[in-house]
Image (cartoon, helix red, strand yellow):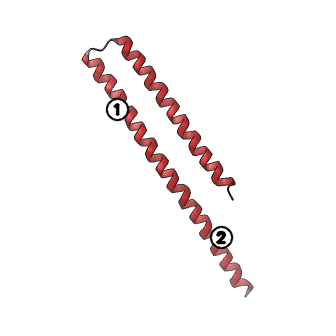
Amino acid sequence: MKQTQDQRSYVRLFQDAGWRLVVFLAGFLVDAAIGSLIFVSLIWFAWLIGVARAAGVKPEHLEVFGETHFWLNYGLFVIIALALGTRAIKGIFRD
């Protein structure tokens, strides 16, 4: 009887761990999709800078836009990395 109870507890343990993994992966995939969408929009912004250059916008303005693009991109990926790290740490210490 004890062996059956141990087997059930191991099965339950792996089911719970599997469920936590699925929940973490679902959140991770949503975050990755949001990050990818933002990344694509920033690439589109860079393309717009190229179009503006071809249209004859002053180089000083393009330089400011390019620097803004860089810092927005940099800050965004730092925020995404911090959100992912926070979620992972919360997932580790939750139980």
Report whether 55 appears left or right of 25.
left
Query: In the rendered view of the protein, which quadrant contains the C terminus?
Result: bottom right
Which residue bears the numbered disc 1?
44
Name the residue rendered at 53%, 40% in the picture. 80
Query: In the rendered view of the protein, which quadrant contains the N terminus?
Result: bottom right
Name the residue rendered at 57%, 45% in the picture. 84
Percent position of residue 16, x then y: 61, 67
Percent position of residue 71, x then y: 49, 25
Displayed quadrant of residue 40: top left
Which residue bears the numbered disc 2?
13
Q: Secondary structure at mark 1?
A: helix
- The image shows residue 21, relative to residue 44, as above or below, that is below
- State the CA–CA distance, disc 1 to disc 2: 46 Å
Name the residue rendered at 71%, 79% in the picture. 6
- The image shows residue 15, relative to residue 58, as above or below, that is below
Residue ranking furthest to the left:
55
Name the amino acid type tagged 1.
Answer: Trp
Does label 1 or label 2 sit earlier along the sequence? 2
Displayed quadrant of residue 52: top left
Determine crowd level at label 2: few under 14, some 14-19, many 20+ residues with C-alpha closer than 10 A.
few
- The image shows residue 92, relative to residue 48, as above or below, that is below
